[in-house]
Amino acid sequence: MKTDITKDINEDKLAFLIRKSAIGMEGVTGMADMPEGLRGGILGRDTVMKDGVKLSRDKEDNAVVDVYIRVEYGIKIPQLAWELQRKIQDDIRSKTTIVLNDINIHVEGVEMGDKND
């Protein structure tokens, strides 16, 4: 289903809601910077990058989200990624009419935590 992101909500607000969903997930320690290869002008003009969230469209013009996170050591990454995909989809559906066709979770780092824990 084609969704006009800007008609329902602007990209900044959508990225904010996605970041809020991710940071609120147990095991996520924060948002990660974009990988160097994704910065700059190599992406199409329909791509928006905001603090660990990349919004773009696929070939069929469907909304696609890439989320770059850091996680705590010992977390089960596949399970976390699956749960985070569902949480983001549910949170966005509850606040907007946007349908996110793809939500890709990228773990960019693992944090060891405090040695005193």
Image: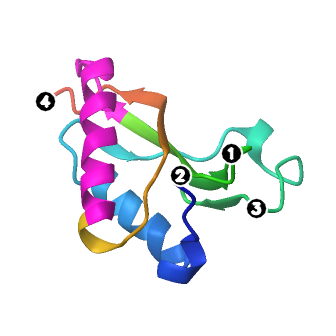
The secondary structure making up most of the magenta span is: helix
Q: Is residue 94 above or below residue 109?
A: below
Identify which residue, 15 or 86, lies in the foreground. Answer: 86
Residue neighbourhood size for the residue with mark 1, other residues' Cα within 10 Å, grouped as few (<14), some (14–19), many (≥20) = few
Taking 97 as reference, is 25 left or right?
Answer: left
Identity, as a three-letter code, of the amino acid under mark 2: Gly
Give the number of the mark in front: 3 or 2. Answer: 3
Residue neighbourhood size for the residue with mark 3, other residues' Cα within 10 Å, grouped as few (<14), some (14–19), many (≥20) = few
The answer to if 81 sits in the magenta stretch is yes
Residue that label 1 marks: 58
Give the number of the mark in front: 2 or 1. Answer: 1
The answer to if 21 sits in the magenta stretch is no
Residue that label 2 marks: 52
Q: Quadrant of residue 34?
A: top right
Q: Is residue 7 above or below residue 31?
A: below
Q: Earlier in the sequence, mark 4 or mark 1?
A: 1
Residue that label 4 marks: 116
Give the number of the mark in front: 4 or 1. Answer: 1
Q: Earlier in the sequence, mark 3 or mark 2?
A: 3
Look at the numbered disc 2 and give the secondary structure of its residue. loop
Residue that label 3 marks: 46
Q: Is residue 71 above or below residue 90?
A: above
Between the C-alphas of marks 3 and 2, the distance is: 17 Å
